[in-house]
Amino acid sequence: MAIKFKAALDILLPYLKKYRFRMVWIFLLVILVVSTDLVQPIIVKEAIDKHISVPHPDMGSITLMTGIYFIVVIAAFGLTYYQNILLQETGQSIIKHIRTDLFRHLQGLSLKYFDRNASGRIITNVVSDTEALNNFFTDFLANNIKSIFTLIMIIVFMFQLNIKIAAYCFLVVPLIIIISAYFQGKLRAINQEMRSRLSTVIAFLAENLAGMSIVQIFHQEKKQFREFDLRNTKLLESTMVENQLTLAYFLFTESLGDIGVAALVWFGSGPVIRGSVSFGVLYAFIGYIRRFFQPINSITMQLNVLQTMLVATERIVRTFNEKPDITEIAGAKVPAVKGGISFNATHLAYKEDNDILKGIDLEIKPGDRVGFVGASGAGKTSLMSLLARFYDPTGGSVKIDGVDIREWPLKELRQTVGIVQQDITLFAGTVLDNIRFFRKEIPATRVYEVSKMIGADDFIRRLPLGYETLLSEKGATLSFGERQLLSFARVMVFDPKILILDEATASLDSESEAVLQEAIGKVSGGRTLLVIAHRLSTVQQMDYIVVMDDGLIVEKGTHEELLKKSGHYTTLHKSGLLIEEALI
């Protein structure tokens, strides 16, 4: 636990330093809050011993003491309110910075990280785990600073009042330490289990929401519901065990407080009767012993917050420690871009000893239009992924215009290589912002120009507000063909010298495909075009076709040349993997 707490401090201290003056002010406010609370029994003790339990009570003095007590209570209320508001604001600001840094770090990680981690787990990391840190600031940190200072002040006041009675009161402390150590171990284990099960629930939920249409198509609602209910039930079980342990811990310390008051009355009544201790002192001791167990109970109740924070921090630290596989070398410069591409004995393996690409050698001249065909899993998309440096080759190299792409600045490389994928991602926002990807520096006129060029302008202007029409998440109100045209326009706005179409026409109907084919013809001039497709209508337009199988290039040539060879391309053609016409 000590190691985990140190790791938590390592990540939190840089953020705390930004608010160090505010944290000092909060600490001073805590001292004032505790002082105004603990002085109250002293005021009552003074009133009892000097103005009530005397032969001639003075109502004027009693009224004065009552007024002082009332002012102290009001001051305690005001200081507590201000301290909590300031602490909440500081805690939320720190968490905002941590979430922002975490999101920025995630954006810089390579796709391998997202291949290994479910989106639900990543969401848990950014949202839920950082919220656990927020609870640490707003609940654990403030309450425990206050509780520790309260305990210290109570001990000082009690020993000043009567050393013997104070010593009796603290005989119960070793028992509290033993109970705390026992419950702390139990809570740490169950909290780790609970956080893990929460991540599982969120990951399953995110996966099913993203694939709800598939679930409904295959009538798997009941099965998926049972799976979700099973995961949710396991989370409930862990949560209930944690709540039971926390409640038991609280009740143990609460009961010790009641026993302490009873023991104090029994020990203190004798000296009061004999006159060696005043009734006011006994009253103050009862007030302090009650207050003594309150911070202990508070620390007890906050231990699960600490455990949650340590587990969450461990996960956040693990994410921050992730390093991108794709890095940019110092001093990388952009060469003069023409669009020539070469794959040189290129290998790629997502997992060790399992090559997806097995020594690809291919030269593509600037301005070439190349089609790539092959069965699913042949390595076509993996080959294209290397060009944009989503992954680095595990062997050999990939070059653009004779320069290894690992020597390119990443930003310029990905502006040079544009990819239109079959899976379309649109964001909540206007059509205009989706096409220029929320980059306001790109003028609207550029968006209009590109949209007209690829044939998207007509349907966009038919929308209720044209380019200012708000799209729902994923553009659900648009047809697939319309979404694909927007995706195409978004790539073309940046005018890439190398354009990759990865099954961009695979799910289009005949009319939408015709529009997109015309757009491809318009934009292919002056740029290198790489097209992955299963449709003859698409690949026949290319200068030549590359046939891939099991991570290798097995054939290359025009449609007619490949058919004459009666090789793998002909087999694909006869098997129906190359579609003669678009399906409606």
Image: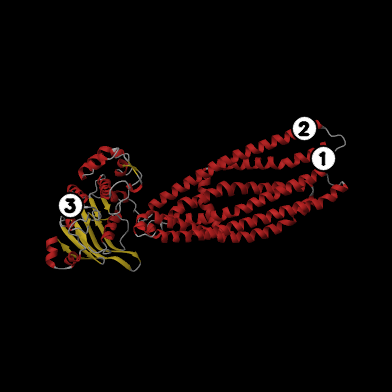
Which of pointers 1 and 2 lies earlier in the amino acid sequence?
1
- Estimate the x, y position of residue 417 in percent, counting from the top left: 26, 51
Closer to the camera, 184 or 316?
Answer: 184
Mark 1 closeness class: few <14, some 14–19, many ≥20 residues within 10 Å: some
Whether residue 361 is situated above or below residue 129 in the rendered picture? below
What is the number of the mark on residue 204?
Answer: none
Choose between 396 and 225: the one closer to the eye.
225
Camera-nearest label, 1 or 2: 2
Please tell me which residue lies in front, 410 or 276.
276
* Badge 2 density bin: few <14, some 14–19, many ≥20, Cα 10 Å: few
- Going from N to C along the chain, the mark reached first, 1 or 3, is 1
Residue, disc 1: 49
Residue 321 showing in the rendered view: no
* Kind of residue sitting beneath label 1: Asp
User: What residue is pinned by disc 3?
Assistant: 367
Q: Of helix, strand and loop, which one carries label 1?
A: helix
Q: Give the distance between the C-alpha atoms of the residues marked 1 and 2, in whole angstroms.
A: 15 Å
- Circle 2 residue: 63
Residue at the extreme top of the image, as rendered: 60
